[in-house]
Image: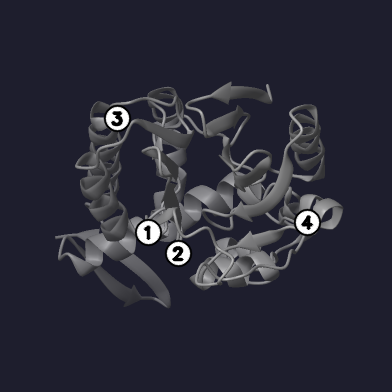
C-alpha cells in the first residue's frame, strides 16, 4: 500500500485505497491528482515526494469525496501548494460538512461526521486560475458526484476518478454510489470512446483498455434499475425499497451504508420517474413509488 507506480517518464500513481496521481513537470516539480483520505495519507504522500526529491506545486482534485481530498489540508499546510477544484466540488471542499449533510438530507449526526465522509476543509482555487498547468486537459465526468472531473496529461495518461468501479467491487456490493444516473450513463458512453496510453481509475486497476470494464459498470447500473422496478411492482415507500435492496445484495446496514446506498437509491428513483418507468403518489401522508 502507498507504493509508487511509474506509468511514463512524467506520470505515476500512488497505489492506495483511492489512487493518487503524480504528474512530474520540469526536473523536480510535481502535481498530485487527489490527496488520499486523511492526514495520515497526506504524510505518506509527503514521504514519497521527499524520497524522490520532488516539490509539490499543486493538487488537482477530481471531486470532493472525503477519500479524495482528505490529505489536502495537511499537504497544503506543509507546502503552501495550491489546490485546484471547480463548481460544486469546490464548495464541498471548502465546507466539507456538506458531504454528510447532502447524503443524509439534513444535519448529520455524529456517526456521520467522521473522516470517511467529512474531510478537513482546505482552500481551493478554480481550474481557470492563471497558475493551473495549461498542458493538462480537464475532462468533465459528472454522474458519480456533482461536478467530478478527470485529467488528461500531455503523455496521454488519463486519471478517471470514480467514474468506473472495479469488477471485484461491483460483484461484491452490487450497487455503487451514483448521484445522477442519467449523467453517469452519459459519462460511461463518453469514456468508452476515449483513447489513452493509460487509464487510471481511482478504484480499479490501471489499464490501456477499459472498454470491457465500462460495459460491466453499465450492466450493473441497468441491473440495479431493474431490481428497483421489480421491488416497486406494488406501491412501496422508500425505507422498504432500501431494505429490499440491502437484502437482495447481501449488504449490512449501518449509518454510513444507510446514507451512501440510500442516496443512490433515491437517485435511481428520480431517474426512473423522470424516464416514465415509475410513478410517485402520496397516500396516507406517505410517498409511495410504483412501477408503470
Identify the secondary structure beneath mark 4: helix
Alpha-carbon span between mark 4 and mark 2: 24 Å
Indicate the colouring scheme: one colour
Note whether 73 is above or below 154 in the view shown. below
Asked if residue 172 lies left or right of residue 114, the reply is left
4 vs 1, front mark: 4
3 vs 2, front mark: 3
Alpha-carbon span between mark 3 and mark 2: 23 Å
Identify the secondary structure beneath mark 2: loop
- Tell me if I can see residue 188 in this picture: yes
* Image quadrant where one finds the C terminus: bottom left
Asked if residue 77 lies left or right of residue 280, the reply is right
* Image quadrant where one finds the N terminus: top right
Residue at (51%, 67%) from the top-left corner? 127
Asked if residue 68 lies left or right of residue 271, the reply is right
Of the pair 17 and 2, the residue shown nearer to us: 2
Residue that label 2 marks: 146
Expressed as whole percent of the image width and height from the top left, the position of residue 9 reads 51, 28
Expressed as whole percent of the image width and height from the top left, the position of residue 36 reads 67, 42
> Could you say which disc has been placed on residue 76 in the image?
4
Residue at (68%, 52%) from the top-left corner? 57
Q: Mark 4: few, some, or many residues within 10 Å (few <14, many ≥20)?
A: many
Expressed as whole percent of the image width and height from the top left, the position of residue 90 reads 59, 69
Residue that label 1 marks: 142
| Earlier-in-chain disc, 4 versus 3 | 4
Of the pair 200 and 134, the residue shown nearer to us: 134
| Earlier-in-chain disc, 3 versus 2 | 2
Marks 2 and 1: in contact by CB < 8 Å?
yes
Residue at (45%, 47%) from the top-left corner? 177
- Tell me if I can see residue 105 in this picture: no
Name which quarter of the figure residue 24 lies in.
top right
Marks 1 and 4: in contact by CB < 8 Å?
no
Amino acid at each position: 500500500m502507498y507504493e509508487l507506480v511509474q506509468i511514463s517518464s512524467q506520470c505515476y500513481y500512488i497505489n492506495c485505497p483511492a489512487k493518487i496521481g503524480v504528474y512530474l513537470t520540469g526536473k523536480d516539480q510535481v502535481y498530485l491528482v487527489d490527496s488520499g483520505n486523511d492526514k495520515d495519507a497526506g504524510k505518506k504522500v509527503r514521504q514519497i515526494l521527499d524520497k524522490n526529491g520532488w516539490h509539490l506545486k499543486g493538487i488537482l482534485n477530481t471531486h470532493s469525496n472525503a477519500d479524495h481530498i482528505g490529505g489536502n489540508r495537511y499537504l497544503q499546510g506543509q507546502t503552501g501548494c495550491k489546490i485546484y477544484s471547480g463548481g460544486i466540488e469546490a464548495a464541498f471542499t471548502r465546507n466539507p460538512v456538506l458531504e454528510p449533510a447532502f447524503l443524509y438530507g439534513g444535519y448529520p449526526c455524529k456517526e456521520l461526521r467522521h473522516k470517511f465522509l467529512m474531510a478537513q476543509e482546505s482552500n481551493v482555487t478554480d481550474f481557470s486560475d492563471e497558475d493551473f498547468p495549461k498542458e493538462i486537459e480537464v475532462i468533465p465526468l459528472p454522474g458519480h458526484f456533482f461536478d467530478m472531473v478527470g485529467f488528461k496529461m500531455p503523455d496521454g495518461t488519463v486519471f478517471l476518478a470514480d467514474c468506473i468501479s472495479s469488477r471485484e467491487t461491483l460483484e461484491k456490493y452490487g450497487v455503487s454510489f451514483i448521484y445522477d444516473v442519467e449523467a453517469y450513463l452519459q459519462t460511461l458512453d463518453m469514456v468508452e470512446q476515449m483513447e489513452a496510453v493509460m487509464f487510471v481509475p481511482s478504484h480499479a486497476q490501471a489499464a490501456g483498455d477499459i472498454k470491457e470494464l465500462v460495459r460491466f459498470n453499465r450492466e450493473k447500473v441497468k441491473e440495479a434499475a431493474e431490481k428497483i422496478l421489480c421491488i416497486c411492482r406494488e406501491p412501496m415507500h422508500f425505507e422498504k425499497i432500501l431494505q429490499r435492496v440491502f437484502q437482495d445484495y447481501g449488504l449490512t446496514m449501518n449509518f454510513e451504508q444507510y446514507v451512501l446506498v440510500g442516496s443512490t437509491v433515491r437517485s435511481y428513483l428520480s431517474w426512473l420517474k423522470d424516464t416514465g418507468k415509475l410513478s410517485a403518489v402520496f397516500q396516507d401522508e406517505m410517498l409511495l413509488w410504483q412501477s408503470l
